[in-house]
Image: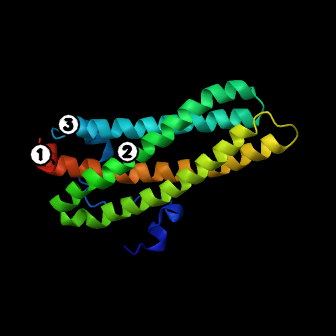
């Protein structure tokens, strides 16, 4: 799919255009959980996204504190490592489930959604690449935890640069994905989309 430059995730600073998120106006975000078609899948989807937002924010905050010497290296390592592993593994798994299971269902049910879900899949590729870069710089940062001089700071700065970019892009993507997915569920019902 050829993506307009302004819609490519690293360039996207605003929500998706109305012709892509065509149900967003009909189903405003603040009404979602009160709608009669808001079911378990929609609730779970939003819970997963909220978990990624929260955990990403926790990792960012901990990294900032570490860079400011507000957390000792060993304490940072104990807090950071399992949470980063969980975040990266579950984000990658979540995107694979969407790409191979859910997105094809949305596309097949409503042809108007094809462009939007193609765009979300392209987002996943961009996020995957940034996720890999973030993981690589995280390994280097953890390896430098007990280094003297500027080595630890430089490694932490390199990780923060990659991970901040990942989180910024991820937050934009999650909002845009919700603007496609949840209104579509409310419009078509979970039963029709997922055979429930």
Name the mark nearer the viewer: 2 or 3: 2
Q: Name the residue under label 2.
A: 94
Q: Are marks 2 and 3 in contact (CB under 8 Å)?
A: no
How many C-alpha atoms fall within 10 Å of the one at disc 2: few (<14), some, or many (≥20)? some
Judged from the image, the secondary structure of the residue bearing numbered disc 3 is loop
x and y percentages locating residue 185 in the rendered image: 21, 48
Residue 164 seen in render: no
Residue drawn at point x = 48 percent, y = 73 percent: 5
User: Where's the C terminus, which quadrant?
Assistant: top left
Q: Which of 21 and 55 is in front in this view?
A: 55
Could you tell whether 90 is left or right of 147 in the image? left
Residue drawn at point x = 22 percent, y = 52 percent: 184
Q: Name the residue under label 3.
A: 39
3D distance between C-alphas at marks 1 and 2 = 20 Å
Q: Mark 1 points at which residue?
A: 195
x and y percentages locating residue 181 in the rendered image: 28, 51
């Amino acid at each position: 799919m050829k993506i307009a430059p302004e819609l490519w995730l690293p360039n996207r600073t605003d929500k998706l255009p109305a012709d892509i998120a065509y149900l967003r106006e009909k189903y405003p975000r603040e009404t979602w959980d009160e709608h009669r078609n808001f079911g378990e899948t929609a609730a779970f989807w939003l819970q997963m996204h909220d978990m990624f937002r929260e955990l990403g924010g926790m990792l960012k905050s901990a990294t900032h504190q570490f860079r400011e010497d507000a957390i000792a290296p060993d304490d940072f390592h104990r807090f950071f490592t399992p949470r980063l592993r969980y975040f990266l593994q579950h984000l990658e798994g979540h995107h694979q489930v969407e790409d191979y299971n859910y997105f094809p269902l949305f596309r097949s049910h409503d042809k108007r959604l094809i462009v939007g879900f193609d765009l979300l899949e392209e987002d996943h590729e961009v996020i995957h690449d940034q996720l890999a870069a973030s993981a690589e710089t995280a390994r280097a940062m953890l390896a430098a935890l007990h280094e003297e001089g500027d080595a630890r700071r430089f490694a932490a700065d390199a990780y923060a640069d990659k991970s901040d970019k990942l989180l910024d892009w991820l937050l934009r993507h999650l909002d845009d994905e919700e603007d496609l997915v949840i209104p579509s569920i409310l419009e078509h019902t979970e039963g029709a989309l997922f055979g429930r």
